[in-house]
Amino acid sequence: MNRKIALVGSGNIGGTMAHLILQRRIADVVMIDVQEGVPQGKSLDLSQGLALEHKSGHCHGSQDYTDLKGSDVVIVTAGIARKPGMTRDDLLSINANVIKNVAKGIKENCPDAFVIVVTNPLDVMVWLMQKELGFDANKVVGMAGVLDSGRFIHFLASELGVSCEDISSFVLGGHGDAMVPMVRYTSIAGIPLQEWIDRGWLTQEKLDQMIDRTRKGGVEIVNLLKTGSAYYAPASAAINMAESYLLDSKRILPCAVQLNGEYGMNNIYVGVPVIIGKNGVEKIIELELNESEKQQFEHSVDSVRALISDLENLGC
């Protein structure tokens, strides 16, 4: 394979992404991590797994950012999750410094790469990444909406007893409790979700519960695992974005992108539906929101702006 994806951060998400990339034969992989031996060990394990399945592909682990050279896509998961006793400012400060270091490595070694940020708090971290890189905004995006939409679709499919393949939906806004699942734009096999409610196939109460569960989807998994956070679904979400870029698939995906006038917002990264192709974010799809949707979206954006303000106040 001539394509190359770099994964900065070799934790659970990074390792799962590497496995998906190699299994799907999307690209060769380099895993970068500050923990010596971790990316090397996971790369060796993955390579041996490929051999057992009679598949070709290359995976390499390193602590050296020069190994980013030649990468078509860089997916960043480096950083820490919030731990008990840690304030939001602690998390912001620590991960902001991580993002700055990663941005330096990307800028020096693969300045033409498409960059996908997964590190939390997502929207403010991708905002900082683009600021530090100085890349065109269409080449720097955040993974959140794809994941959140997948969660909402899963809950709907389970409740309605239908296949996920027949459900179309997406989530707007920041990656947090204020995200906005777009009920009005949700359909099952082309049938608007509202019609399912009107026919009595789904109650409004059940729908409201699913929306709330979607907003708190990450926390639910953290509480269940007790010693970690979600990684299978986040990994799949990021790879869907990378694959659309590499294969020029033109998929419409909800991603955290920079808005410059769209939805009445400026200089802010937040989740909206976009077309991803060989040029990165090729089009931001601006929807007509009703008054309720607009208010929810603005509330979500305000929460992202508050985090950016906190970050700036910390001097990061």
Image: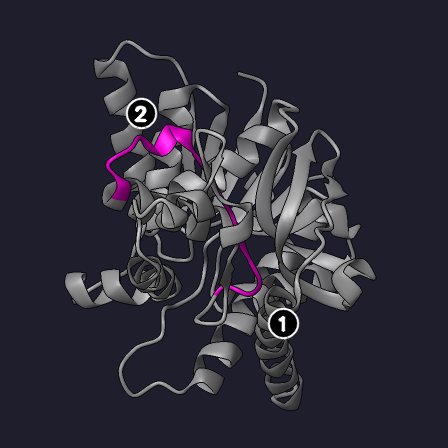
Q: Position of residue 118 (x, y in %)?
A: 49, 55
- Say what amino acid the circle numbered 1 marks: Val
- Residue lying furthest right: 261
Q: Position of residue 204 (x, y in %)?
A: 35, 60
**Snapshot colouring:** one colour
Q: Position of residue 180 (x, y in %)?
A: 51, 62
Give the labeled residue for mark 1: 301
Q: Position of residue 31 (x, y in %)?
A: 44, 41
- Say what amino acid the circle numbered 2 marks: Ser
Could you tell me which residue is drawn at 75 percent across and 34 percent down?
279
Count of numbered labels shown in the rendering: 2
Q: Quadrant of residue 266?
A: bottom right
Q: CA distance from mark 1 to mark 2?
A: 42 Å
- Residue lying furthest front: 199
Instruction: Provide the residue span drawn in magenta.
Output: 160-175
Q: Residues within 10 Å of mark 1 (few under 14, many from 20)?
A: many
- Residue lying furthest top: 54
Q: Is residue 296 left or right of residue 44?
A: right
With respect to residue 173, does 17 lie above or below? above
Could you tell me which residue is drawn at 79 percent across and 66 percent down?
264
Q: Is residue 259 left or right of residue 208?
A: right
Could you tell me which residue is drawn at 39 percent across and 64 percent down?
215
* Screen quadrant of the C terminus: bottom right
Q: Secondary structure at mark 2?
A: helix
With respect to residue 228, does 193 lie above or below? above
- Which residue is nearer to you in this view: 268 or 157? 157
Residue 178 seen anywhere in this rendered image of the structure: yes
Instruction: Tell whether position 170 is magenta.
Output: yes
Q: Is residue 22 left or right of residue 291?
A: left
Numbered tag placed on residue 47 in the rendering: 2
